[in-house]
Amino acid sequence: MAAGWARPAGFALLVVVVLAAAASADRPARGGLSVTAGAEESSAVFPLYGDVYPHGLYYVAMSIGNPPRPYFLDVDTGSDLTWLQCDAPCVSCSKVPHPLYRPTKNKLVPCVDQMCAALHGGLTGRHKCDSPKQQCDYEIKYADQGSSLGVLVTDSFALRLANSSIVRPGLAFGCGYDQQVGSSTEVSATDGVLGLGSGSVSLLSQLKQHGITKNVVGHCLSTRGGGFLFFGDDIVPYSRATWAPMARSTSRNYYSPGSANLYFGGRPLGVRPMEVVFDSGSSFTYFSAQPYQALVDAIKGDLSKNLKEVPDHSLPLCWKGKKPFKSVLDVKKEFRTVVLSFSNGKKALMEIPPENYLIVTKYGNACLGILNGSEVGLKDLNIVGDITMQDQMVIYDNERGQIGWIRAPCDRIPKFGSSLL
Ligand SMILES: *[C@@H]1O[C@H](CO)[C@@H](O)[C@H](O)[C@H]1NC(C)=O
Ligand SMILES: *[C@@H]1O[C@H](CO)[C@@H](O)[C@H](O)[C@H]1NC(C)=O
């Protein structure tokens, strides 16, 4: 049934449901904090590349190693561990844009390290370390049967900060040498994954532990492709954004603004409150069977005669017009706005206009970019993916325990100095 629709390239869908992150409560107490206490944290901004369609992911270039080499990493707020396809040597790697990262022995993180305990705790709940000198092996399994087997290493990441310093902290990440991907011959758009979840292994938590940035990350994904990613809170528009307290997700440690009621064209769709998570590692949005059905019925019941349902290899539900569409702008008038209304704390609305749930394919059809999550095994979880977060700044603020969003021109990368708030 799903065979017809082309899966976006790379890991975009793979990283939808990664095994859990370590709870932020069990963040290991590391010496770094006391050393840097009192120092001012800074921020870092990175340009993003990629798009929802046709590439199916947004990625960032990071400089890793000594001397630093560039790697493309899939930006994933739905998992904690950053990892690179790796020549350790590699047993099974897909074709990646840059030469494989090559670890040296002195880069291996021993299994007695707090980072290893946190990683294992997050992935399996169990941490086995027979001898202190042993390396830290791990395996991550993703929702669609993809997996990565690897070993934890530390190497330096070169970051240019807003205060114009360049820092090179040693950060722990995975060196993945045995990947099972949906189709192993596929060329990957990225060299690995940038894990930005809230667990202590997350790159973000590590930067905080080093006193470099606050534990705040945000992204602004442009509908025209690209956009920007930031660490730290210097450019966060605190007073203007819509905020919802982070909810402890029932099963895992995802970023969740809690449960939401669903509206279409201003009308409630009468479905049970939906448990929602925000995940930049998912290119599309997924609703579980009940809200998906309700939304599809509402959209179909509301369509004008100008649109006819057609099969399209890109996605399961598509429509054509009298002429092929060139962009979503040609067809948005035919569709209404979807709203998620969060009520964990003060009421917070996320408006999802047609631009944030439709794509126009290379065949000129408009397709629904909200998919049936039950069909891919997401159970009751609803995922707000890239398509819905486009042209908004989305902020995951682990310092204040809140998630925010605000409409923004994402193709304008803030320049520090001018846009410092
Ligand atoms: C910039 O911030 C970093 C991280 O806090 C700090 O280490 C560095 O000394 C700061 N540089 C300047 C020029 O203030
Ligand atoms: C969504 O997926 C579930 C599970 O596969 C299926 O039972 C249901 O019919 C699907 N809903 C729609 C509208 O396709």
Image: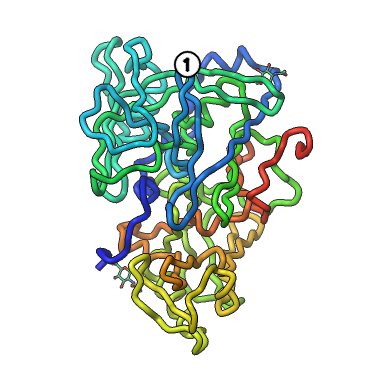
* Residue 97 x, y percent position in the rendering: 38, 36
Q: Dot 1 corresponds to which residue?
A: 67
* Residue 265 x, y percent position in the rendering: 59, 77
Residue visible at 65% across and 60% down in the picture: 347
Residue 397, picture quadrant:
top right
**Which secondary structure lies at badge 1?**
loop
Along the horizontal axis of the image, is 264 left or right of 380? right
Q: Is mark 1 within 8 Å of ligand 1?
A: no
* Residue 103 x, y percent position in the rendering: 34, 18
Q: Nearer the viewer, residue 234 or 323?
A: 323
Is residue 112 something one can see in this rendering?
no
Q: Residue furthest left?
A: 91
Q: Is residue 331 above or below residue 212?
A: below
Residue visible at 29% across and 41% down in the picture: 141
Quadrant the N terminus occupies: bottom left
Residue visible at 42% across and 32% down in the picture: 82
Dot 1 amino acid type: Pro
Figure colour scheme: rainbow
Residue 48, picture quadrant:
top right
Q: Is residue 194 above or below residue 335?
A: above
Ligand 2 shown in quarter: bottom left
Quadrant the C terminus occupies: top right
* Residue 28 x, y percent position in the rendering: 47, 23
Along the horizontal axis of the image, is 195 left or right of 141? right
Q: Classify mark 1: residues with Cα within 10 Å, few (<14), some (14-19) or many (20+).
A: few
Q: Nearer the viewer, residue 325 or 352?
A: 325
Q: Residue furthest bottom?
A: 305
Residue visible at 45% across and 35% down in the picture: 72
